[in-house]
Image (spheres, coloured by chain):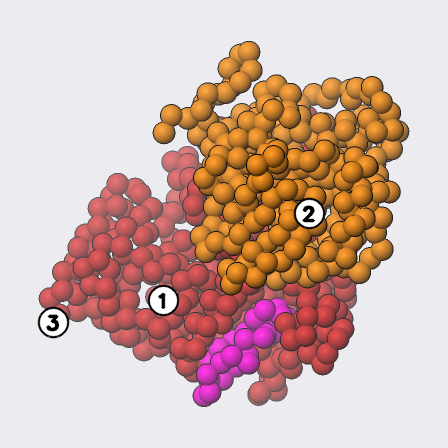
Amino acid sequence: MNLRLAVSLLVGKLLIRVLRLLRRAGTTLPGRVSLAIAPYLVQRVSASARFRAVVTGTNGKTTTAALLESILRKSKLDTVRNVSGANMLPGLASTLVEHSNLRGIMDCDVLVAEVDEATMPTALPQVSPELVIVTNFFRDQLDRYGELDHIVALVRDSLAHARGVVCLNGDDPFAARMVDHLPSGVQPVLFGFDESPATGAAVPSASEGVDVQFCPECGSRLVYHHITYGHLGSYYCSGCAWDRPPLDVVGTIITQDGLSGTRMRISFGDSGEQLEVSLRVPGAYNAYNALAAASAAAALQQDTEAICTGLEEFTGAFGRMERVSLSDGDLLLALVKNPVGFNEVLRTVHAGEGDKVLLLAINDHLADGTDISWLWDVDFGRFACRDDVSFVVSGRRADDMAVRLKYSGVSEDRVQVCRDLEDSVSAAFDRGQDGASVYVLPTYTAMLDLRRIMARQGLVRRMWEG
Amino acid sequence: MRVRMCHLYPDLMNLYGDHGNILAFQWRCHWRGIEVTVDEVTLGDRFSPAAYDIVFIGGGQDRQQALVWRDLRERGEALREAAELGVVMLAICGGYQLLGRYYRSAEGEEIPGIGILDMYTTAQSTRIIGNVAVTSPHLPDPGTLVGFENHAGRTHLAEKAEPLGSMLSGGGNNGEDATEGCVYRNVFGTYLHGALLPKNPHFTDLLLSRALERKHPGLHLEPLNDAVEWSAHRAALRRAGVRDMQPGGGVSRRSS
């Protein structure tokens, strides 16, 4: 038994226990300490799983990883997955510490690790997965990442260490292009959606499509046959022959039932098999997550039964359109982190029936992104004339959010500023007294705070569940 | 009364929510019953800057900016003439750099700019990122500006060039001389995102006044109820580490 590793794991496990007793989230400190003692920890412990899968990209990492886990569990495979927020090296290490014994052995079949895009260069060689999923690329936390091109380059270069299968979102020009940069021997699997009445217009909206406008080959403008959301869709170059590569796994959206979910068909090019799935999580963004997980599962030889059930039984990951029951009623909790994600959540909320109260809790700590300029790329204008929608704004940047709403045409009497998060929850429910649905849309750290508050108010679910 | 605005390269130079500045102009005109039109001009479009009251250009990624520089330089003469005529221009970050004399890349290549603002920018490998508070003599009480900066470029003003303001907190033009932005006639360049104008309603109104005064001399803009904006402004000042505004106006600089 390697003494250094054992000590590192022991110390880490103790820290996890202590932090839990103190009711602190603590997803990265134990890992940080353990890594300081045994820097090769991630490599060693990851290798003990029978199989490793990594999920990266801007939006959908957590949900895609959770969906994949759901499918694998249907096949009776034991999985270990890191919780959202633990997707950088220390957090990943914490998860591995928690689930391994003192010899660094995890008793699991598959390690499903969501990895932050900027961490891919360091994490990928250490985890050494047989499967990688790249969900999409959107501008997010520019204060931390710099520029989107830079992030894309980091992920692309990290894939030089890939082996086995790499699932890429063919509908995202950034991700699709990576198919040309994979080492030989790696099997690419491209997934995407074909056109259906449920897909939208063929022009990226000004605020959403700005990340990808030009052909990476020749620099001419990209044109779309159809767009599902943001810059995702079927594109071709107006100047050269570059276009969306042929898809290995094709999704078709059959119906979108607002908040109740989506019915979709998945066609696997390889086997010719098809299945129809009724997803219980809403929005085009979740349809992509399901498609990604299905593509990965198929590449891992999972049978369609497991894929179908795994997808259909999934009710949502930590904070992603999660329905939470409180003594006062139900609320829907959806994490917001960047313009496209926020827009998709708002679009889904907008489609819901009846009166609504939206609690927008905006923080600007490191994990939320310190530059809140991104709020100006979110389209709140759709609520301008909707008298059935009122707002409570909270968090450290509550005042910025109030200004954002004012300059979207939302009248001030429909907006209540409530800087204290606990009060804001009560305020939202007060406004929701007459049967209005309550939606809570927090940034990351605000979500953690809210869950703590809700746990104190009698909600059973532990906040470190993911 | 009408304000004609031009938004340059909205598809390429909108990386940090700079679109919020257009919204600020639009709503503050709308609330006063002033008609406002916004023309969007991008690569290859015909463009007469002198035909507008306000021209706006935001910031973008390096790749997009290169395309924009090439396009905008072809209109350099027209833009310089418009600046002399007193057309109001607001340029943020990448747009700001473009209005200077040149941009020196990391490889030492000097790319000429439009030359309206007497300054130049050099590329650095580190970025200046964070919440910002500025005090500006161009602005009415309290004379502060709040925003967020995120730039690798370091801008250096010529000796006679006028900055937009001086730093209360943050890096500003180059992190060394405590200046922020640059002003020439009615042309304002700055590194401030946030978006800039919504939390600085006095700045928006200054730009609107300058634009409207050209056709309506002596005009006074009707004041609006800006309680929401000033709440956010004060919160942003605190966030940038600046102690609250004093009752008679003015701010105290953070001691550290």
- Residue under label 2, please give it: B115
Front disc: 2 or 1: 2
Crowding at dot 3, Cα within 10 Å, few <14 / some 14-19 / many 20+, comes out as: few
Q: What's under tag 2, amino acid-wise?
A: Gly
Q: What's under tag 3, amino acid-wise?
A: Met
What's the residue at 58%, 20% (across, down)?
B142
Q: Secondary structure at mark 3?
A: loop
Q: Secondary structure at mark 2?
A: loop
> Could you give the CA–CA distance between mark 2 and mark 1, rounded to whole angstroms?
43 Å
Front disc: 3 or 1: 1
Label placed on residue A1: 3
Q: Point out residue A125 in the picture as x, y percentages from the top left corner.
A: 35, 73
Q: What's under tag 1, amino acid-wise?
A: Thr
Q: Is residue A164 left or right of residue A282?
A: left
* Magenta highlight on residue A166: yes
Find the magenta span and give its range.
A165-188
What's the residue at 33%, 46% (across, down)?
A25
Say if labels 3 and 1 share a chain: yes
Which chain letter goes with mark 3?
A
Q: Point out residue A242 in the picture as x, y percentages from the top left corner.
A: 68, 78
Q: Check the rendered structure and report the hue given to chain B.
A: orange
